Amino acid sequence: MMFPMFFQEFKCKYGAVPFCESCCKLAHSHPNRAKHRTENATNPTRSIRMVLSAVLCIHTSHYVTYCRVPTPPQPTRNPDGHAPDTSPSPSSSSSSSGPSSSWVFFDSMADREGGVGGYNIPQVEECPELEEWLANPAQLLHDRDKAPEYVKRLISDALLCFYVRDKTCS
């Protein structure tokens, strides 16, 4: 569904905002948008699906990042017992969404060695349940207390979100 009224309301330069049905209901539950009219999206080639790929967070002058990273394929063996060549070919394309990716937390200043003249020790941690929590915003709203600490930190400290085009959609 498309909503030209959103761009008049927010003085944007585009012609309309596309929404899925559930997001449409949520966005238009606000009383100021009761008079918005909907239009069917007749030209689906104009729509591009974007996938969240990273989130930059800040808390008390300390920046950290959550990044989506490709999950390496599980090695398989050829009939001769040797591992196959897994180097990417120029024609292969990898998607940054779905089960072929996971999330990691990166903190460049997680620990410090040597005091004033010392150096920072970076830390990278896996965030195994982050995709599930991000995929279900209703669960996040209702069960926030049950979320792992890294999910709570992402939600409370998010500053910038980075998106990439979903290569699985054409």
Image: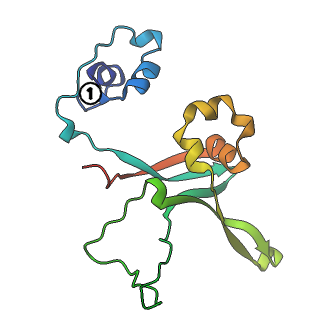
Is 20 above or below relative to 127?
Answer: above
The quarter of the displayed image where residue 141 is located = top right
Residue 30 placed where, x, y %?
47, 14
What residue appears at the point 46 percent right and 14 percent down from the top-left corner? 29
Residue 18 placed where, x, y %?
31, 30
**Three-letter amino acid code at the position of disc 1:** Ala
Residue 169 placed where, x, y %?
29, 49
Is 15 above or below relative to 99?
Answer: above
What residue appears at the point 70 percent right and 66 percent down from the top-left corner? 109
What residue appears at the point 58 percent right and 57 percent down from the top-left corner? 65
Residue 11 placed where, x, y %?
32, 25
What residue appears at the point 55 percent right and 42 percent down from the top-left corner? 134
Q: Is residue 45 left or right of residue 73?
A: left
- How crowded pointer 1 is (Cα within 10 Å; few <14, some 14-19, many 20+) is rated as some
Foreground residue among 4 and 12: 4
Q: Which element is circle 1 on?
A: loop
Q: Which residue is mark 1?
A: 16
